[in-house]
């Protein structure tokens, strides 16, 4: 029942060339980036022989280290919170019918659609207003910093987590929960012993996705970051403006490798077996 | 009400609405302890909803539902002494067979060792010994079915609920499981409440059957009663095969068929009532016109054979009587020649084998 037709001559050739061009377009910049991160020259785009100096600099540069530690803190914490909130949101939307169900459903997807800049401005405005309000009413002063960055990351990660978890829940037969209840499990136990193990791949996948997005975000973070809360991507962005050094090549390669690893893990987790029954 | 305390399940005036839809409409039903009870009807008739209400997976909108005399109306499923075998078994895919079967016991707080021991015993009873460590998706449909049974029965439910448990099995396996279920039920002496849309299955296995349609309980009775004395046109048509002949009551002895023929059919309905006469294919006799016995003259019709189907043990004739085709089934006797299509013949039936039902509601 194959629906693919045998292409011949010109069409086949044109498609092959197209495929090659697409891949070149995708991966040539990455190849260049990786190559020049090993280049022993102070200019970003000039080959000066092989060296690991830039990676060494990456390891020794205190600012980079600080940014990396901020990135990891923000990413881990925001992921943890957004996994809990995103999973519960997914459960509520997938398992219960309530008033405004569809509305909340649409709302949840919004952060995925909204442009980063818009989200960033929204967040900035929100925090500024909130801080003014707290200052005026309670006399407590807050400043932008780790907390605001983390909160913003939680705000957009929830959507991604709940989308992934919902996909998993939708593939899971609801009768399984009924069966558990029928077999004397309380609501909590049915969740703990049947639902949760079956959606775990989705939860893990969602968490890794949230982690990746948090580690990669520049735009939103830059708007809501304060002194001492510069994440690695924001730092790299700053480096470019100050004058480019091949150090950013090395930093970028490390970030690229970490992202690819996380996305791969996320895909693997989502594919893990269980959930859909025969 | 001493009668209620002896009933395994007692349903009184139970109605279930989903929004505007009435899924179960004022149903009254008593299911005795130790009974193999089937709920039969086409899909969407409310039989599964009724079962789910007994299980506690749905709560009645109105009415009272008791299990061994205890009101369970809105008790959650985990607090009821019943267990369910689900339609697609609903085995936990992330657990092996032993864990699946011991799940209920573990949830009740039985310690792991005792639970495993009892689960193993039950796994042996359903002849799955040696499969304890397998996952559900490594078993065949019939084996999964038996795991589902074991998982429910290990908890020693007072009533076992089965929702179309054989629906997913192929014919041969289905027939084996029917026998197996029936003997299991006899052995355990527990009431089985069995939901099915397959009338043959219901007739084969059940002590009593409830026929449902459009949320209403039409008739409850043993297989013979349902087959020979259906209360209305729907039941007559749904249980077994039958010829439903439209007629009007002439008096308490006679009815008038569509073409004006009067036939004898004692009935309790007032003259002029629209009725249907149910004639089972096997209770109609067929022969030459002059062969009609004199006592059956008033319960005979003439017709023309339009088709003949040989089934080995019997021959099925389709006979056109003036205004409608009738199905007639006679045993195939070796050496006795059969009628050919086109033959002009007479059919007749015993005065007691017809059954008059009010012509109301569903028309098959």
Image (cartoon, rainbow, N blue to C red):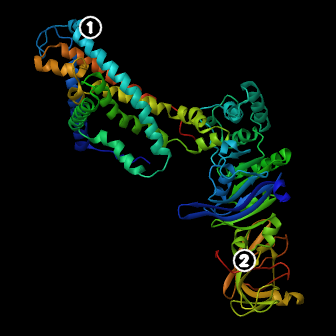
The answer to whether A155 appears left or right of B122 in the picture is: left
Q: Residue B165: tell me if it is visible.
A: no
**Which element carries disc 1, helix, strand or loop?**
helix
Mark 2, residue position: B243
Reply above or below: A31 against B10: above
Q: Position of residue B9 (x, y in %)?
A: 76, 54
**Which element carries disc 2, helix, strand or loop?**
strand
Mark 1, residue position: A59
Query: Chain letter of disc 2?
Result: B
Residue B32 location, quadrant: bottom right
- Name the residue located 74 percent from the left edge and 28 percent from the top edge: B116
Q: Nearer the viewer, residue A216 or A90?
A: A90
Residue B184 location, quadrant: top right
| Image quarter in which the C terminus of chain A is found | top right
Reply above or below: A215 against A198: above
Q: Position of residue A215 (x, y in %)?
A: 30, 24
Q: Nearer the viewer, residue B97 or B54?
A: B54
Q: Specify whether disc 1 shares its chain with disc 2.
A: no
């Amino acid at each position: 029942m194959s629906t693919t037709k045998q292409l011949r001559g010109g069409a086949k050739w044109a498609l092959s060339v197209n495929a090659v061009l697409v891949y070149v377009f995708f991966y040539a910049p990455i190849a260049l980036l990786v190559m020049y991160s090993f280049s022993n020259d102070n200019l970003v785009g000039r080959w000066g022989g092989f060296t690991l100096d830039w990676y060494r600099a990456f390891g020794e540069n205190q600012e980079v280290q600080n940014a990396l530690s901020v990135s990891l803190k923000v990413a881990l914490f925001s992921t943890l919170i957004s996994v809990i909130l995103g999973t519960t949101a997914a459960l509520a939307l997938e398992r219960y019918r309530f008033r405004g169900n569809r509305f909340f459903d649409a709302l949840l997807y919004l952060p995925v659609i909204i442009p980063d800049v818009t989200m960033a401005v929204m967040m900035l405005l929100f925090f500024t207003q909130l801080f003014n309000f707290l200052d005026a009413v309670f006399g407590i002063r807050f400043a932008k910093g780790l907390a605001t960055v983390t909160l913003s990351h939680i705000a957009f990660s929830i959507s991604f987590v709940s989308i992934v978890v919902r996909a998993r829940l939708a593939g899971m037969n609801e009768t399984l929960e009924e069966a558990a209840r029928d077999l004397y499990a309380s609501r909590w136990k049915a969740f703990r012993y049947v639902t949760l193990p079956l959606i775990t791949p989705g939860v893990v996948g969602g968490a890794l996705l949230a982690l990746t997005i948090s580690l990669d975000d520049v735009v939103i973070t830059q708007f809501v970051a304060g002194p001492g809360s510069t994440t690695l991507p924001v730092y790299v962005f700053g480096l470019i403006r100050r004058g480019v050094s091949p150090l950013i090549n090395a930093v970028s390669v490390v970030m690229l490798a970490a992202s690819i690893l996380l996305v791969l893990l996320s895909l693997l987790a989502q594919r893990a077996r269980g959930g859909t029954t025969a | 009400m001493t009668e209620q305390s002896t009933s395994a399940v007692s349903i009184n005036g139970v109605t279930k609405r989903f929004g505007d839809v009435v899924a179960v409409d004022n149903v009254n039903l008593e299911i005795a302890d130790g009974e193999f009870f089937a709920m039969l009807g086409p899909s969407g008739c409310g039989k599964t909803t009724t079962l789910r209400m007994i299980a506690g997976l749905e709560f009645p909108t109105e009415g009272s539902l008791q299990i061994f005399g205890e009101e369970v109306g809105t008790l959650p499923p985990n607090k009821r002494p019943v267990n369910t075998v689900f339609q697609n078994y609903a085995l936990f895919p992330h657990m092996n067979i032993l864990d699946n079967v011991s799940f209920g016991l573990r949830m009740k707080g039985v310690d792991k060792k005792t639970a495993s021991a009892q689960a193993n015993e039950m796994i042996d009873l359903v002849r799955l010994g040696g499969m304890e460590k397998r996952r559900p998706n490594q078993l065949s449909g019939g084996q999964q079915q038996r795991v589902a049974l074991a998982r429910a029965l290990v908890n020693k439910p007072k009533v076992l609920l089965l929702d179309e448990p054989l629906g997913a099995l192929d014919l041969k396996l289905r027939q084996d499981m029917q026998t197996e279920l029936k003997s299991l039920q006899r052995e355990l002496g527990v009431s089985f409440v069995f939901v099915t849309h397959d009338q043959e299955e219901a007739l084969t296995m059940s002590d009593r059957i409830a026929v449902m349609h459009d949320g209403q309980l039409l008739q409850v009775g043993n297989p013979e009663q349902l087959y020979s004395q259906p209360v209305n046109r729907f039941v007559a048509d749904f249980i077994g095969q039958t010829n439903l002949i439209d007629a009007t009551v002439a008096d308490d002895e006679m009815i008038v068929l569509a073409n004006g023929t009067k036939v004898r059919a004692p009935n309790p309905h007032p003259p002029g009532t629209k009725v249907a006469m149910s004639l089972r294919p096997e209770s109609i006799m067929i022969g030459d016109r002059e062969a009609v016995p004199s006592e059956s003259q008033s319960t005979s019709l003439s017709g023309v054979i339009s088709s003949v189907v040989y089934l080995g043990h019997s021959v099925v004739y389709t006979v056109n009587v003036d205004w409608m085709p009738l199905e007639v089934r006679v045993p195939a006797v070796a050496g006795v020649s059969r009628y050919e299509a086109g033959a002009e013949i007479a059919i007749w039936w015993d005065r007691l084998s017809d059954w008059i039902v009010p012509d109301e509601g569903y028309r098959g």
